[in-house]
Amino acid sequence: MLGLMVALLLMCTAFPAGAETGEKSQAIQIPNPSADLWREVRQREALISGKSQVKGVDSGTLINPYGQQWREFRMSQLIPYGGYFLAGVLILLALFYAVRGKVKVNAGLGDKKLFRYTLYERMIHWFIASVFLFLAITGLVLLFGRSLLIPVMGQAYFSLLASACKEGHNLFGPVFAVALLLVFIRFVRRNIYQKGDLTWLLKGGGIVGKGHVPSHFFNMGEKSMFWILVLVGAVIVGSGLILVFPVFGQARMTMELSHVSHAITTLLMIAVILGHIYIGSVGMEGALDGMTTGYCDLNWAREHHAEWAARCEQEGEVLTESEVARLRGERMAQASPPGVQEVGQ
Ligand code: HEM
């Protein structure tokens, strides 16, 4: 009897501890149902294809190790090195500005003007510029947001921002393709390389150093920016369409490759456009006028686009400020609806 009581006592005290260790050992012993699959994925270097009754592009793919490779590339190379690259470009531009300062018009801005861009040309320029900037910002949020923004704004707000950026990016991506086509058609003729362009490049475009380097309507730098925009832009648009519309029968691997080429080409393009924005705004006196008002300063044109300026002067196209004001007023009146014209007159 005593033996039975001792045995019962021991069982009661030992039960909880026994249950705990039993649970632990059970938890350790139950194999992860996906472990075999992941072990296979890590060991395989090629796709494992099988047969499936499910109809779909990738439904016969049993194991795709490239997905894991793509994820690792994105997380451990694309994001950190892409970030350093863009930060490096910004630092270089800031250093360049600190050393070189604003490129001034040596003769000073005068009161004579040349007509440079039509309203349509300015409209498509600012159209592509705003769409590009919107896509660049939303794309950068999607690429770097997890690392840079979650610590600042928290997961909940970042998730809202990231969803909005994703929808906006997908919506305006195809709009960029239209803008690129319009810019290409309008500006291609003036961006064909000509004799003399290489001299401009060899002399540093007048930005490095002091002397004036003659150039045509667009200089070699602008022409190269245009061709990078068109050619790299075509890759960005193509890869973007593959990512947004998965209806072309593309498999996951195609999507992974498209994502990588989309991200790399876009980072390159953002770097080029940062240089363009720099030189078109704070970097050079008088550069922005043509793209905002349609007219540029004659002295600026003589110093940066000498051959074009000389042709315009020979053909008597130089305008005074009052002529420009009158012409702009006439154009505004023509562009306004009749009611507005009457009030204005
Ligand atoms: C938002 C900031 C931007 C500023 C301040 C800016 C400024 C300028 C200026 C001043 C010009 C005229 C240069 C000249 O008359 O010689 C120009 C031309 C041009 N810009 Fe921009 N731009 C900006 C953004 C962009 C973006 C984002 C793109 C394209 C994605 C772009 C594409 C172009 C093109 C294609 C030209 C004509 C140059 C050529 O065809 O060679 N711009 N820009």
Image (spheres, rainbow, N blue to C red):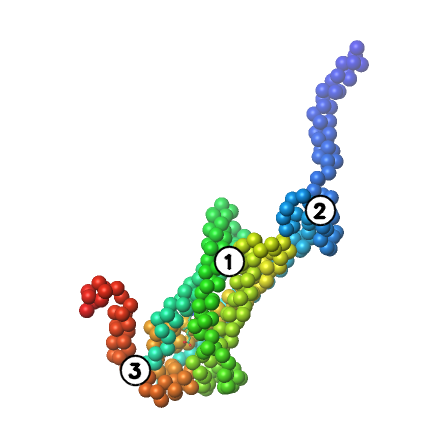
- Marks 2 and 1, Cα distance to the nearest angstrom? 37 Å
In the rendered view, tell whether residue 1 sits above or below residue 44. Answer: above
Where does label 2 land, which residue? 51
Which mark's residue is nearer the viewer, 2 or 1? 2
Direction top: furthest residue = 1
Residues under labels 1 and 3: Cα distance? 43 Å
Would you place residue 149 above or below residue 335 in this image?
A: above
Residue 220: where, in percent of width, then height?
49, 80
Q: Is residue 122 above or below residue 2?
A: below
**Which residue is more in the foreground, 212 or 248?**
248
Gap in Å between the C-alphas at discs 2 and 3? 75 Å
Q: Residues within 10 Å of mark 1 (few under 14, many from 20)?
A: many
Question: Which residue shows up at 48% across the image and 63% down it?
Answer: 177
Q: Nearer the viewer, residue 173 or 162?
A: 173
Q: Is residue 42 above or below residue 81?
A: above
In terms of sequence position, does the residue under pointer 1 or pointer 3 come before the other? 1
Figure label count: 3
Q: Position of residue 323 (x, y in %)?
A: 26, 79
Image quadrant of ligand 1 equals: bottom left
The structure residue drawn at horizontal position 66% and vertical position 47%, both measured from the top left corner, is: 59
Q: Position of residue 74 (x, y in %)?
A: 61, 57
Q: Which residue is mark 1?
A: 139
Mark 3, residue position: 319
